[in-house]
Image (tube, grey):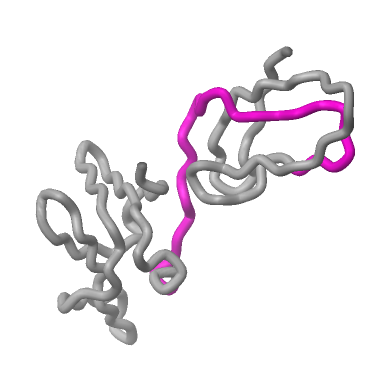
Amino acid sequence: MWKTIENCNQCGASYEIDVWDLGHKESDILICECCGNTIKQYCNEAHSYSISKMINQGTLKLKYEDWEKYKGKKLKFRKGSEEIEGILQGLGESVTVLSPEKAVRLWLIKADKGNFELYPESWTISIGK
């Protein structure tokens, strides 16, 4: 067995990967724990790969309109020293004005500390644990 490093092309997460030599051919994929993107896909190789540890957590580049894709998922939001981890419930009651022509309802996050409403594009976002 040896180790290698793989990075997610979508969110930038880095992983230490264990690689084993096999006496047969194997096929599988490695999925990013932060965003769900495929990190490595291998087919009919005489090696097997598995994630041994995450080196750096990645961040998602979500737009406001992505709320439906991530509804029901646990997300971690960071801005400066503030951090909120919770489940995206959908859109809340509060409205924020982005420009004279555009106003949007904020994302509603259900967290252990209570409910929060926020505009996602001003936060660093990753998948919660």
At a point 82% along the width and 19% down the height, the residue shown is: 21
Point out the image quarter for the N terminus.
Answer: top right
Point out the image quarter for the C terminus.
Answer: top left
Farthest left residue? 114
Is residue 40 covered in magenta?
no
102 relative position to 1: left or right: left
50 relative position to 44: left or right: left
Q: Position of residue 53 (x, y in %)?
A: 52, 24
Is residue 44 covered in magenta?
yes
120 relative position to 63: left or right: left
Q: Position of residue 28 (x, y in %)?
A: 74, 42
Q: Position of residue 25 (x, y in %)?
A: 88, 33
Farthest front residue? 23
Q: Which residues are magenta?
A: 41-65
Q: Main secondary structure of the magenta part?
A: strand
Judge by depth and name the residue closer to the eye, 85 or 48: 48
Q: Position of residue 123 (x, y in %)?
A: 33, 52
Judge by depth and name the residue closer to the eye, 119 or 5: 5
Judge by depth and name the residue closer to the eye, 129 or 65: 129
